[in-house]
Image (spheres, rainbow, N blue to C red):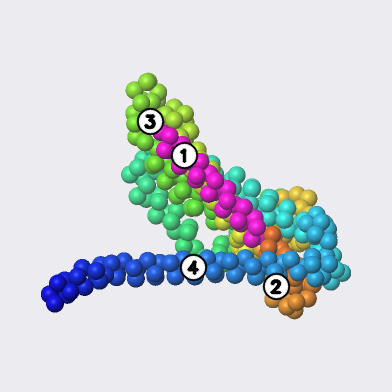
Amino acid sequence: MKNEELVKQLTSPSKNSRLEKFGKTITFLCLALIVFIVAMILLFVAQKGLATFFVNKVNIFSFLFGSSWNPAAKEFGALPMILGSFIVTLLSALLATPFAIGAAVFMTEVSPKGARFLQPAIELLVGIPSVVYGFIGLQVVVPFTRSLFGGTGFGILSGVFVLFVMILPTVTFMTTDSLRAVPRHYREASMAMGATRWQTIWHVTLKAARSGIFTAVVFGMARAFGEALAIQMVVGNSAVVPTSLTTPASTLTSILTMGIGNTVMGTVNNNVLWSLALVLLLMSLAFNSVIKLITKERGKKNYAR
């Protein structure tokens, strides 16, 4: 009898094994739920977006490359919004990158003690809501652009200034992390060979961290590409192909937020907005894929070292 009880105790799962099995089950269910939600979002947007071409018979090439957006006249050329989104995103990233690298170099290489004051100031920019950025752009940036370049003040340039401030913290903090990840012996070896501190920063530190810096820039571009409210308030929302930086333009997000509540579900006017959302989603996935690719290559290089 005692032998049977002993065998039963030895063969039955212990408390730790039951807890481990329970933890694995909960983890699997959480992961499955996340994958299910993401898949449903992708399928829903794809179903609504593709209905424009398969149900309403809108030509996909005229949609992507057409320059006239007038839903009332059944003209659905999305090229003005696509160009507006890319121009605003690229210019804001180009403007933010030098400032972000400069701030990151200051906090990591020049004056690490100064980071105690500069970092909280930059962190404040993260907590400001988008609508506040939009109001500041409306009250400050737009009049400034109007007085400097003429016109209405609404346009791509105003949107670039607003997005520059919005993505600056993201690019700065990710660049700072990349610079801090550079091994210390890189700097020491450069100094030992007679290089000055600035030569070390330029030729060694920044070069070693360039994949991380590029990741930060792409991440900031993804943030700028998906911004809606702030850019809508300053860009002008004119669905025409941009001819200059100071004329009113539009982006994918601005047309979406303006039109999605004014259309009837299932109509062609509503479906084309979902098609714009599909384009926006695909571009966001492309940005994420680029970030993942850069991170993967960076990991291979670090492993090789």
Q: Which segment did they paint magenta?
A: 280-305
Q: Cα distance, mark 2 to mark 4?
A: 31 Å
**Circle 3/circle 2 CB separation < 8 Å:** no
| Residue 301 is a magenta residue | yes
Give whichever of discs 4 and 3 has the lower sequence position.
4
| Residue 30 is a magenta residue | no
Residue 206 appears left or right of 148: left
Q: Secondary structure at mark 3?
A: helix
- Residue 32 shows which numbered tag? 4
- Residue 273 shows which numbered tag? none
Amino acid type indicated by mark 4: Ala
Quadrant in the picture for residue 28:
bottom left
Give the percent coordinates (x, y) of residue 19: 29, 69
Give the percent coordinates (x, y) of residue 241: 79, 54
> What residue does disc 2 label?
260
Q: Nearer the viewer, mark 4 or mark 1?
A: 4
Residue drawn 40% across the image and 23% down it: 195
The 10 Å Cα crowd at callout 3, few under 14, some 14 to 19, many 20 or more, is: some
- Residue 186 shows which numbered tag? 3
Q: Nearer the viewer, residue 50 or 201?
A: 50
Amino acid type indicated by mark 3: Tyr
